[in-house]
Amino acid sequence: MSGVILGELPALPLHTAGKYVAGAYVVLFALVLIYVAIMAVRLSRIERELGELSELSERSHSETPELDRSASPPSQTVADQQNVRHPESTPA
């Protein structure tokens, strides 16, 4: 059905169609340029936040003393601590 309708419509003359093609390219270029600008802003914000987190992490590592791991071993391993069931978490 649409093929019949398109076949009956006259084609645009080349001097008229050129303006629309150029306009479509300008709009497409503008959209791509806006997209790239938005991504650049987001990337710079993420880099700034990552730098702040890295600085905060370095500062907290320098302020906390290192733990002496050669002292007495812990009473439970991590696997044992994860397998401990709490009374409030067991189904009734």
Image (tube, helix red, strand yellow):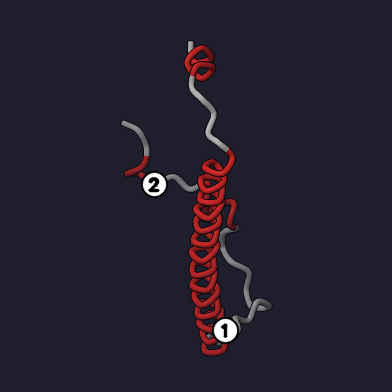
The structure residue drawn at horizontal position 59% and vertical position 51%, both measured from the top left corner, is: 79
The picture places residue 20, in percent across and down from the top left corner, at: 51, 45
Is 74 rendered above or below residue 18? below
The structure residue drawn at horizontal position 53% and vertical position 14%, both measured from the top left corner, is: 3
Amino acid at circle 2: His
Q: Quadrant of the C terminus?
A: top left
Does residue 35 appear left or right of residue 90 in this picture?
A: right
The picture places residue 74, in percent across and down from the top left corner, at: 58, 66
The structure residue drawn at horizontal position 63% and vertical position 69%, both measured from the top left corner, is: 73
Amino acid at circle 1: Glu
Q: Which residue is mark 1?
A: 58
Residue situated furthest right in the rendering: 70
The structure residue drawn at horizontal position 50% and vertical position 82%, both measured from the top left corner, is: 56
Q: Which mark is residue 78?
A: none
Q: Which residue is mark 2?
A: 86
SS at mark 1 in the image? helix
Quadrant hosting residue 70 = bottom right
